[in-house]
Amino acid sequence: MEFLRPRSVREALETFQKTPGALALAGGTDFMVGWNMGLLNGKTVVDLSRIAEWKGIEAGKTGVRIGSLVTHAELQRHPLIRREFPLLVEACALIGAIAIQNRGTIGGNIANASPAADTFPSLAVYEAVVHTASPQGRRAIPFLGIFAGPKKTHLRPGELIEAIEIPYARPRPSAAYFRKVGTRAAQALSKTVAAGLLWLSRGKTVAESRFALGSVAPTIRRARKAEDYLRGRKLTAETVGRAMDLVEAEIAPIDDVRSTAAYRFAVSKNLLKEFLECRPR
Amino acid sequence: MPAVGTSARRYEGPEKLSGRALYLDDHDIPGCLFGVTLRSEIPRGRIKNVVFDRAFPWSECVVATAEDIPTNIVALIEDDQPLLADGIVRHALEPIALIAHESREKAYEALRFVRVEYEELPPVLTIEDSLSRREILYGSDNVFKRYLVRRGDVEKGLRESPVVVEGEYRVPHQEQAYIENNAMAAWWKDGALTVMGSLQCPYYVHKAMKKLFGLSDGQVRVIQATTGGGFGGKEEYPNMIGGHAAALARKAGRPVKIVYDRSEDMAATTKRHPAIVRHRTGLSRDGRLIAQDIQVLMDGGAYVTLSPVVLSRGTIHAPGPYECPNVRVDASVLATNTPPNGAFRGFGAPQTLFAAELHWEKIAAATGIDSLSLRRKNAFREGSVTATGQVLKESVGAREVLDLAVGKSGYLKKRSSYKRWNRDPKKPCWKGIGLALVHHGGGFTGSGEVYLASRAAVSIGRDGLVRVLAASTEIGQGTNTLFSQIVADALGLPRDLVAIENPDTAKVPDSGPTVASRTCMVVGGLLRRAADDLRSALLEAAGGSIPQSRSKLRQAAVRLCAGEKERRFEASYEPPAGVHWDDKSYSGDAYAVYSYAAVAADIEVDKTSFEVRVRKITTAQDIGRAINPLLAAGQVTGGTAQAVGWALYENVVMKNGRMTNPQLTNYIIPTALDTPPMDVILVEKPFSGGPFGAKGVGELPMDVPAPAIAAAVHQATGILIPELPLIPETLHRYHDQTQRQR
Amino acid sequence: MIKLNVNGKRRSFSGPLFKRLIDVLREDFRLTGTKEGCGEGECGACTVFLDGEPVNSCLIPVAHAEGRKVETIESLANAKKLGVMQEAFLKRGGAQCGICTPGMVMTAEYWRRVGGSPEPEAIRNVLAGNLCRCTGYQHIVDSVIEALGRRRKKARGQKA
């Protein structure tokens, strides 16, 4: 097994060019499980952890730029993130437990592309943009556009995630919602995970809503049909019920060792309802 | 100051807390190889061929197969289980061959270069499947063991009962999930074998090794390493792993260590027996029991292992702690092609008590009398007669624990306030509080302790050191501490002058296995007697009073030892007077005494996610005298948490006879946040046959929370779910069905 | 070869850089207090500090500890005396079989060092990555409260 440790972005890109098929290592919280299971025998591993450029959080005028190696613990502690992106903070606080949050990185989480990733619904409703670097140059990919399937992304060979940019939600939303329904209260993988932002205009009419669900389809899903339907409507038992029906058509959960499709359908709808009713738990 | 009754600090606590305690994998054994196990991929079939791929450098390895085992039998109750499959596999993950290598990674890698060719046979995977006798796996009917307990005339009783309530209850596997995986090491010297490992029962391993390798008592030595939890999971499986390590070491001529990883431990080793329990209960209109007709069916897995004894305990506890004139318990454990099920805290009782206790909810609905009143009407009291005909003469705390759990939890008030709360559709959750009451027999069933004939000893050396000599292992429950307290008080010595010898068959007598809530009550009793003898001798040697300092003790010890290195005082088991048991009719005094426990479980069910959250457990437990209240409470909180896990989270998913979620990521045990705060009340009704009045406590706490939680879920949701685990998916499924029916 | 600081001592390691930190600690440095329970960051028995923060040493290639401070359970007590958290676990029954204990104590010790809240719910939350199968956690929570209480008492005493 070869273990390569570039110190800069340029070195990292060159390393991948020289060793196609190499695997990228960031915080290791998922990666090392594979190592322990013997799945990495004979593979070349490129350790990105020494790339200092990817470790910062920068506040801009319209949003924040988070280096891909920023950990889930760092995100939770950062005052600007706490103020502007509480749904991301809530999600990070529920990834494994503290020892995992201290190591796992936002970029690693995205590259890993687990359908159950806890940060994804939050990043989806904040409409984050993923910045990448590759020998062919840099590009910016809308968050939802990066995923190709379970554990699969549209990143090209040798293309690496540099940063995640999240625009400030303006005007500030009337309500923000996050909930993870996991296998237990903590140190859990999600069975269904949801985030929502709601803007109400005067008269309790929905100006805009964004709702995203994880663990219920091969990739993270925004509930576009429900969002479109709700725009301009008042929230009543009837409109909420209709939105719940629309969500059902937008997800494709499966039975697996953690849960069942039937349960995930029901809970996804209930989560939307809880979000729209703005009901404190 | 007496040590008994105080929360004396854990004897081996400093070693464990500082990281100095040595578990098996912490031992640096010179020249040791690492062993791994090739296992069956299919549940049933003939092995046609085992192919070792030439691409791997096999010369670096030692390989053992069935041919290398002198007597290929893992000795336990029956001789049906081979150490390595010979020609036929009867369950998925059955060991077929062993490989040892200097490097752990290389040993695992070698497994990928072995292929087994099978001729598959149709597997039997469930209790129903086994009952159908479509395939015969064992004997003529797939029944490993059947028991019939009879009291009165159950058919007549049912005929004459104005109310008859029927119910069927199902409970699943449960994985022990000790945090230290199974681990054993073995080495040979001059034809003698030493085995060291993470284990509960040194003399079980000792017996198994003698048979496997044709050795005499003196040629086998078994040493317990610090053991990271057992809960029954290290009762008999160490025989298997110890045998594997010994077989490899024998062939290699070097020590061999086998340490399972989590997946292997979960998928391959024993679990709690799944069970189906059916009740037909006859009652008077005012809720008095007239007849209990109970059928118990357990899934034993592919070999007999401990199933008969698990079934026995399940059978005897099946009616619950209630007096009923007409009882029939018809219980069987069946063969299937799944990994053998085995011992797990409670040992059959949690399965049958879940059914007995939840059944009260059904009876309450049928009679219109609440389950608390029903229990109060029927619960054991002194003088009650059990289903096996045992008269309960003393230390019967059933009613007391029930009343304490009810009173301390605010059960009655909550029961009615939750009723109101649940009527409000705007509330985000449903609430419920549920009850359960159980008993648990201490020590081996029936004549078990007589057959065991355990021995334990206390010695004093010329150096003045008092040593406790027993094969009873410390596996977290506090054996060392309790023994030191009992012996110190019996001798009238300060506790720090008493040392515990590590369980090592070369040094300690066979005090029996560390199981069945017997360590404190039975072995503690032996030690008390042994210590009494030492005390008399010491008094004589010291001129009438027990020395209280190390130096004075040494002077007396020198006199006492009279030139010998040490003096040893041994006691062996003697059945308490007036205890009778008949194995043929399965009647009589099933246990010397029972412990009792009640739980009130206060829960919420989230309407969005159907998750059950236990807000609070209030439990009262009658364990006789608490030798060490802190350790006793620790047994209660720990057993309760395991039962909360069994009730709400732990789901062994089986597919084609194989566990598909053998990781701590997917087999969910409770974290600190999933485990509720617990209010533990110890009720001390002393038992005259236990040391200082102690009864058993190890298993009792595991029996009681699950039915209380299910009863609480019943109140919360209005649905009586007769199965475990109550995972959200199950609640949702039942809720959905109920909605459709309305 | 890489250099790292383990329990206050400078150490060097010249084996494969992808070796897990837990294996380096246990096999190369013979610090066997750190335990492995699952190998997937689920049970927390392998918890050590990396620059003062609790991490799962089974998920860390030793390369990631290069130039950093690693602290293990062995650093909390000296030959004569247990640390404050260990003493509290001994008094309150926080350890039973002991296999989760080193990891549990490390996470609890982190909470003590950062001045964490003594509220049971907060303690349960920070310990949620350390599985224990023996205690039902209640005595562990009591132990942590005990240790935090001592700190408070001490602080009050100094003020007075």
Image (spheres, coloured by chain):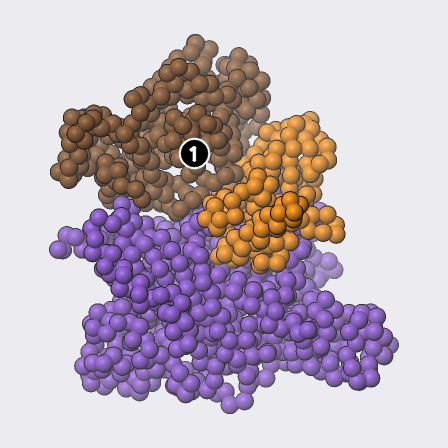
Chain colours: A brown, B purple, C orange
Q: Position of residue B114 (x, y in %)?
A: 51, 42
Quarter assignment of residue B461: bottom right
Residue visible at 56% across and 64% down? B630
Q: Position of residue B56 (x, y in %)?
A: 57, 37
Residue visible at 56% across and 79% down? B693
Note whether B350 is above or below C148 in the view shown: below
Q: Position of residue C78 (x, y in %)?
A: 73, 47
Q: Position of residue B727 (x, y in %)?
A: 33, 52
* Quarter in which the C terminus of chain B is drawn: bottom left
Q: Residue furthest bottom?
A: B578
Residue B96 horizontal side relative to residue A127, left or right: right
Q: How many discs mark residues in the rendered view?
A: 1
Can the viewer see residue C35 in this picture? no
Which SS class for mark 1?
helix
Mark 1 Cα within 10 Å, few/some/many (few <14, many 20+)?
Answer: many
Residue nearest the observer in this picture, C6 or B202: C6
Q: Residue furthest front?
A: C160
Residue visible at 66% across and 27% down? C67
- The residue type indicated by label 1 comes to Cys
Q: Residue furthest top?
A: A136
